[in-house]
Image (tube, helix red, strand yellow):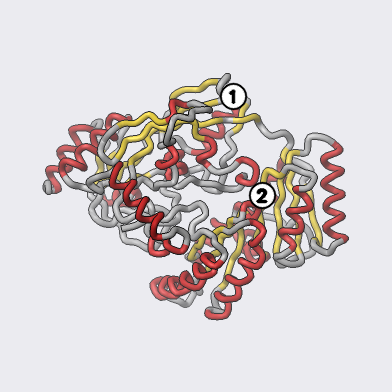
Amino acid sequence: MATRDDVLLALEAVLDEGKLRTDSDSLESHGKDWTKMYEVAPLAIAFPRSTEQVQAIVKLANELEFSIVPSGGRTGLSGGAVASNGEVVISFDYMNQIVDFSASDRSVKVQAGVITQQLQDFAEEQGLYYPVDFASAGSSQIGGNLATNAGGIKVIKYGMSRDWVLGLTVVTGAGEILNLNSDLLKNNTGYDLRHLFIGAEGTLGLITEATMRLTRQPDNLTVLVLGLNDITNTMDVLKAFQSKLDLTAYEFFSHEAMGHVRAHADVPAPFESSAPYYALLEFECTTEQVMDSAMELFEHCVENEWVVDGVISQSETQANNLWRLREGISESIAPRTPYKNDISVVVSKVPQFLTEINDVVTKHYPDFEIIWFGHIGDGNLHLNILKPVDLARDEFFAKCVKVNKWVFDIVEKYNGSVSAEHGVGLVKKDYLRYTRRDAEIALMKGIKQVFDPKGVMNPGKIFD
């Protein structure tokens, strides 16, 4: 194995001047993601500007026997971008260009470091729309979104990140550049390798460019927030509204979650009465008939005692304020060091699934505050357990590890997923078997061996 100095000299030779950093601030900031459970200790941070420079770094990793950890916007919640063992971090901060755009194809080619919001704004400037959206859109990068197959708040209508990928440029763990799918909408010629790299968390290779589909802009997005009598009413309301409206979002949050948002920021309550849970619905209100249907459905829900109260946005400003009740939750609870679980089941099973998990956590740790929210329209729930103020962080995390066993036993019982959209990384890898069978995991390891024979790409993530 090469010495530290050998590695640094070799990296400096393939990068632009000043694009290799070893100062403590850079190592700390680029060696981690949003998880707070791991110490970080990368060897260096490399900032390539091109696919060819990424390839050169990967070839050096194979030759000099060092490991690579990819770094995007570092907004991940599963430790997928954590570098704890002297790895070289490849940051895509300087690969942030929009490369090409085709109006007739409704497609845009971007480098991996393009920020989600940057792509959304570019699409809007062209009179089009990039629909994958989440709270971290202002800092998350497209490469990282694809590496974790990020979903967000619009999945019920628009699907996950992978549904918008026409083509990928990747550098495999062996240092080979692949151009996957040639940006084709239809291409039925054997295995579609781009989908192996989407969701692989950088364990097979590195996504350097992506061609993304765009769509038409939505028309007059309108938001409706409803107070629910019971968690089971989420499904009653969803079924009723989907019978007549095409929803672009269907989110939920608990009264406790809303309380944290309102305490953290100047966000008004949606209405005077309170409810244990709230549903946020979004739809395109294109005609008076659509609005009439929404009002009829609301009245139907009230008559059936599923809904306590509700409010519908009358302007874009009001719609944004209502969204803040949902989108502001993660930021508002961050000071309480939340332990996060990102789980999913089939939509119809959500109420009983959530109730069982809530009961088991409350039974064992009645002093823990539980905050529920999530993309309930696609079966994705976010369980957040807040650290008591007087409990040490290490002790709190140790107790939460015990919680994981109970929670994931229930996930397995319902044939759900231990990670709906945040990836596996370090946080979830010990629990992968709750969602994937042994035969599947063996095949995944075999696939990694094909693309990354020397194991240099993000080692220790997803599985050992």
Instruction: Identify the residue shown where x is 41% and y is 36%.
Output: 112
Q: In this figure, which residue is indicated by the disc labeled 2?
A: 323
Assign a secondary structure to mark 1: loop
Where's residue 288, x and y in %? 86, 37
Instruction: Identify the residue shown where x is 68% and y is 43%.
Output: 248
Where's residue 17, x and y in %? 23, 32
Q: Is residue 265 above or below residue 131?
A: below
Seen in the image, is 134 located left or right of residue 1?
right
The amino acid type found where label 2 is placed reads: Trp
Where's residue 460, x and y in %? 31, 56
Q: Nearer the viewer, residue 139 or 167?
A: 167
Marker disc for residue 311: none
Q: In this figure, which residue is indicated by the disc labeled 1?
A: 126
Assign a secondary structure to mark 2: helix
Image quarter in which the C terminus is found: bottom left
**Contact, mark 2 vs mark 1 (Cβ under 8 Å):** no
Q: Is residue 318 visible?
A: no
Where's residue 168, x and y in %? 42, 32
Q: Is residue 329 above or below residue 98?
A: below
Q: Count of labels shown?
A: 2
The amino acid type found where label 1 is placed reads: Gln
Q: Is residue 177 above or below residue 35?
A: above
Q: Earlier in the sequence, mark 2 or mark 1?
A: 1
Quarter-of-image position of residue 301 = bottom right
Instruction: Identify the residue shown where x is 50% and y is 65%.
Output: 338
How many angstroms separate mark 2 from mark 1 (CA)? 25 Å
Badge 1 crowding class, 10 Å Cα cut-off, few under 14, some 14 to 19, many 20 or more, is: some
Q: Is residue 295 visible?
A: yes
Instruction: Identify the residue shown where x is 52% and y is 33%.
Output: 119
